[in-house]
């Protein structure tokens, strides 16, 4: 069980069941997903030094598999941003920076490739940074949460709706 709050002089505090270090963040505090974990923004904590933000882990929440927009907000937006442009609150801590997902179809000659999208979620065909903890591999997470194909289909439909024309 997490303590109610920080003690006097403590540089750490508890947010959403995770221990956070307040001195390492310039943007909101964030936790990240690696195989079953997701970023969770914790607003209002300013960075006091010039250290690079650090990414922590937290278990993925079970969002309804029919809620593509809700899954995007919970699983993708912390890195890619709510508008999918790669400017989420965790982006500052990631190298390389998250992709602008609104350009997914444009980068594929105007066609939204279902195969490419599903391969990204499964971890196939990713650049080297996406083969490590920079981007969670969501396929196994969705399998564990249940309704994997329904989750992928509704997340894909939501992302298709965000594509630039």
Image: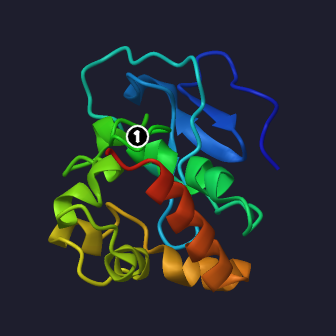
User: Hey, which quadrant is residue 40 in on the image?
Assistant: top right
Q: Nearer the viewer, residue 64 or 136?
A: 64
- Left or right: 102 with respect to 23? left
Q: Nearer the viewer, residue 100 or 95?
A: 100
| Residue displayed at 70% across by 22% down | 7
x and y, in percent, of residue 39 in the image: 53, 49
Q: Is residue 37 visible?
A: no
| Residue displayed at 22% across by 56% down | 106
Question: Where 18 sits versus 144, above or below?
Answer: above
The residue carrying mark 1 is 90
| Residue displayed at 43% across by 75% down | 121
Query: So how many labels did they put on this image?
Result: 1
Q: Is residue 140 visible?
A: yes
Question: Where 61 sits versus 23, above or below?
Answer: below
Model colouring:
rainbow
x and y, in percent, of residue 108 in the image: 20, 66
Q: Helix or strand or loop: what does disc 1 sit on? A: loop
């Amino acid at each position: 069980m997490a303590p109610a709050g920080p003690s006097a002089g403590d540089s750490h505090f508890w947010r959403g069941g995770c221990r956070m270090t307040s001195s390492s963040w310039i943007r909101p505090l964030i936790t990240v997903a690696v195989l079953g974990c997701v970023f969770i923004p914790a607003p209002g904590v300013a960075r006091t030094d010039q250290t690079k933000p650090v990414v922590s882990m937290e278990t993925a929440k079970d969002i309804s598999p029919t809620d593509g927009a809700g899954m995007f907000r919970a699983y993708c937006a912390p890195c890619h941003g709510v508008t999918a442009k790669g400017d989420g609150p965790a982006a500052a801590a990631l190298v390389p920076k998250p992709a602008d997902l609104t350009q997914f179809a444009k980068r594929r000659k105007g066609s939204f490739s279902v195969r490419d999208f599903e391969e990204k979620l499964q971890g196939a065909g990713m650049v080297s940074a996406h083969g490590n903890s920079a981007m969670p591999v969501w396929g196994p997470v969705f399998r564990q949460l249940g309704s994997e194909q329904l989750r992928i289909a509704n997340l894909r439909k939501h992302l298709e709706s965000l594509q630039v024309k």
